[in-house]
Image: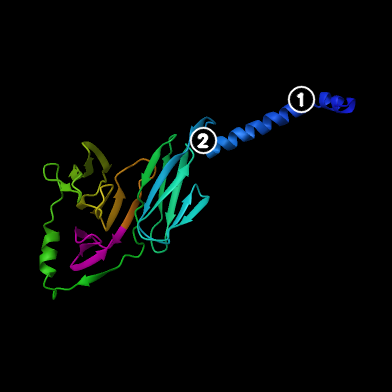
Amino acid sequence: MDDKVKTHLKKYKPEYIILVLAIVALLIGFIGYKKGYRFTENFMIGKAGKLSLNVALPLANIFIDEGEKIVTTKDNELLEISLSPRKHTVIISREGYFPWKKDFVMQSEGKVDLSPVFVSSNPSGMVITNKDPEFWKIRNKIIVDPVPTKESPRISKDGKAKLWLDDNAVMVEIASTTKTVIQPDPAIRNLYFYKDRTDVIIFSINNAIYAIEVEKDGTQNFLPIYKGASPSFIEGALDYIYVLDGEILMQVYI
């Protein structure tokens, strides 16, 4: 090595050391990233977790932290997304449906399972006239429909959850854990699980019928299903309910 090179290296030795350290740091960061390590919000290092999204409808737009966008392509699509261990926000929108949002914290090497709720912003259905042989049977069943109590609760279709009303508070019990979902001032008239789910309930109050999520963590989505004068309802098949609003009886899809 000639004298000029030695002099140059000696003169710029600190800069070369910094450059080498930076390259080493980048290599370590790249290797760590490939192995799933990420920075948390407080600049600690944790391992990426998995977000599992079960999306019922195709053509749904999924926004992760208002940045990454994914569009579903089929019914009941299961997506698994790697996320850094910190707070995240997922927003799902689809034409003709109310948007759904959830805030959550991903733990290091954690797993978060989410099932978005799709409620139509323009509910459809049909009027059932008194000429229909089932009219009076359905109407009378709605009129005498009792709200569930702790002694006589609604049972979810999978048999894993119980639902009842206590002092106008909606209570859900899953795996021996009881949660208060909502306790409004106006009286709740009807109360059921939403479709075949245990994490969403449907109830009538004032001039509307709503769906609300059981969990309050993050965003507790509260979605209108039907608005009228003073509707009451009972469940029908999986995808519809029977609604009695005044003297009008309807089958409303949910």
Q: What is the magenta range? A: 225-254
Q: Quadrant of residue 143?
A: bottom left
Q: Position of residue 230 (x, y in %)?
A: 23, 60
Furthest residue in direction right, as rendered: 3
| Amino acid type, label 1 | Pro
Q: CA distance from mark 1 to mark 2?
A: 30 Å
Q: Is residue 155 magenta?
A: no
Mark 1 or mark 2: which comes first in sequence? 1
Q: Position of residue 145 (x, y in %)?
A: 13, 56
Q: Residue at x 49, y 47 (%)?
A: 65
Callout 1–callout 2 Cβ contact below 8 Å = no
Residue identifier under label 1: 14
Q: Secondary structure at mark 1?
A: helix
Which residue lies under the disc numbered 2?
37
Secondary structure, mark 2, is: strand
Q: Residues within 10 Å of mark 2 (few under 14, many from 20)?
A: many
- Say which of 215 and 146 sits in front: 215
- Residue 210 % position (x, y): 29, 54
Q: Quadrant of the C terminus?
A: bottom left
